Image (cartoon, grey):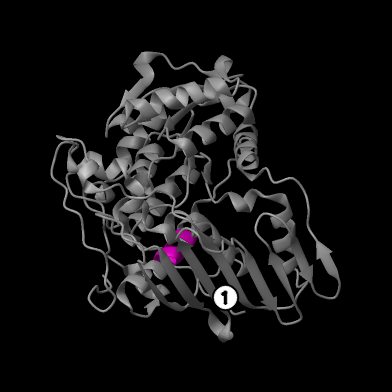
């Protein structure tokens, strides 16, 4: 397969995306990060205390004997309190050093967490906030674990990547939540593919067919006096600016594995179909998208994503080569059928593995940097969503220049926040 040059694009998101990192560099210059050279304690902070954030916190605390949680932030107090209770339930009480004065609530909680003396920050809020939080964490000089995806629009993702380059320059770790890359059986599987075990890769079929993640409650259930902003953040999975659609927030894992098979070369172009079968009230995401990607030399991949209940579920990857084929069937069988049949087995502990490797890299002074592939995999997923939403063929070159920016201007907890109508192919245009 012919590989393309990888082009980096400058950030374009409003205001914070146009700022420099000079102020953050000054902060880093005053910081003390000697822990990696032998101090016992690594101070961890979490921004986003939902279920995934709580899980990431537990994995971080279990990754290193000296890891302690010292700061927490969320927009909702009940989620922060619930996270603390859950971590105590995981027998981690001895690693929780978070007094009330380091438990922050509100849209600006991320700033307050980053202003503490933490060494590592876990960014696990809804992904619409990810570019903003990545920039702030890099400016503050923290080691970063950023849950997938990198953002929900092209401008934000490119800007987040530009910011993330600063983490490497400051010798800070940047680990992405594309956790399958840390699963050892899958590492062995893709390594053998890249060694030519099934010949040249010709086609990948990926599926992420499942039920809804979070259904949108009816507007009539909205409590009196609740602001537009709070209503949407509480139901974040149903709004494109916050979750990016199911293809981006959930099935981006499968897109990442497609890129893994293609040795991280981006596609030339794609077309897609999609829509919404089930009513979703005020929500504006699709519940199914199929994407058809094309690489040079006729190499192709298909990505089928669906979140509709009571149907056949499948989360698998099927790879066809010039002299064989391979498959990852759900969470079970992993096999290659080439010159010989090879099976790849072992415990699946990818969530813990990514934190184990991150903290080990920090201790060694050789921090991991996943920012480039996180940017690329997220942007390829967005490429598919934009093709489905517009009905247009979208090229990689277009994505590198896209000005789509979904994040609200002047986001105010108590302010008005209009809900964009659901996309209609042929009416919505590529931006």
Q: Nearer the viewer, residue 308 or 193?
A: 308
Q: Position of residue 206 (x, y in %)?
A: 57, 68
Counting from the top left corner in percent of width and height, residue 41 is at 57, 20
Label 1 CA crowd tier, 10 Å (few <14, some 14–19, many 20+): few
- Main SS, magenta region, reads helix
Q: Quadrant of the C terminus?
A: bottom left
Q: Nearer the viewer, residue 114 or 269?
A: 269
- SS class of the residue under badge 1? loop
> Does residue 31 appear anywhere in the picture?
no
Position of 197 compared to 331: left or right? right
Q: Is residue 382 visible?
A: yes
Q: Which residue is mark 1?
A: 3
Extreme residue toward the bottom, this view: 297
Front residue (pair 273, 68): 273
User: Residue reaching furthest front?
Assistant: 310
- Kindly identify the residue that appears in the image at 79 percent across and 72 percent down: 337
Q: Which quadrant holds residue 361?
A: top right
Magenta residue span: 377-382
């Amino acid at each position: 397969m012919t590989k393309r040059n990888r082009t980096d694009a400058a950030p374009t998101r409003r205001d914070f995306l146009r700022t420099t990192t000079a102020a953050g560099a000054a902060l880093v210059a005053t910081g003390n990060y000697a822990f990696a050279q032998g101090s016992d304690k690594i101070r961890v902070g979490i921004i986003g205390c939902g279920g995934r954030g709580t899980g990431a916190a537990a994995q971080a605390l279990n990754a290193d004997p000296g890891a302690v949680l010292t700061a927490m932030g969320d927009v909702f107090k009940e989620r922060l309190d619930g996270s603390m209770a859950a971590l105590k339930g995981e027998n981690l009480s001895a690693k929780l050093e978070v007094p009330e004065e380091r438990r922050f609530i509100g849209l600006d909680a991320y700033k307050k967490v980053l202003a503490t003396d933490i060494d590592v920050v876990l960014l696990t809020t809804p992904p619409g906030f990810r570019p903003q939080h990545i920039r702030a964490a890099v400016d503050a000089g923290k080691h970063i674990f950023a849950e997938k995806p990198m953002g929900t629009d092209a401008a934000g993702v490119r800007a987040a990547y530009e910011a993330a380059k600063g983490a490497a320059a400051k010798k800070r770790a940047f680990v992405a939540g594309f956790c399958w890359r840390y699963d050892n059986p899958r590492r062995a599987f893709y390594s053998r593919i890249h060694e030519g075990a099934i010949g040249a890769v010709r086609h990948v079929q990926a599926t992420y067919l499942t039920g809804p993640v979070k259904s949108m409650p009816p507007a009539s259930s909205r409590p009196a006096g609740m602001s537009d902003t709070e209503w949407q953040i509480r139901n974040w999975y149903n709004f494109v600016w916050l979750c990016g659609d199911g293809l981006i927030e959930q099935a981006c894992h499968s897109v990442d594995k497609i890129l893994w098979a293609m040795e991280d070369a981006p596609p030339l172009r794609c077309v897609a179909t999609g829509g919404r079968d089930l009513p979703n009230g005020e929500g504006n995401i699709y519940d199914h998208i199929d994407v058809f990607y094309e690489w040079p030399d006729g190499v192709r991949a298909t990505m089928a994503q669906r979140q509709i209940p009571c149907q056949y579920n499948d989360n698998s990857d099927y790879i066809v080569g010039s002299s064989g084929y391979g498959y990852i069937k759900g969470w079970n069988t992993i096999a290659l059928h080439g010159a010989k049949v090879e099976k790849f087995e072992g415990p699946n502990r990818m969530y813990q593995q990514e934190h184990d490797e991150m903290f080990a890299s920090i201790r060694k002074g050789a921090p991991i940097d996943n920012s480039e592939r996180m940017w690329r995999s997220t942007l390829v997923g967005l490429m598919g969503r934009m093709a489905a939403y517009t009905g247009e063929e979208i090229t990689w070159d277009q994505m590198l220049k896209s000005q789509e920016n979904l994040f609200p201007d002047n986001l105010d907890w108590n302010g008005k926040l209009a809900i964009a109508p659901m996309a209609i192919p042929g009416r919505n245009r590529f931006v």
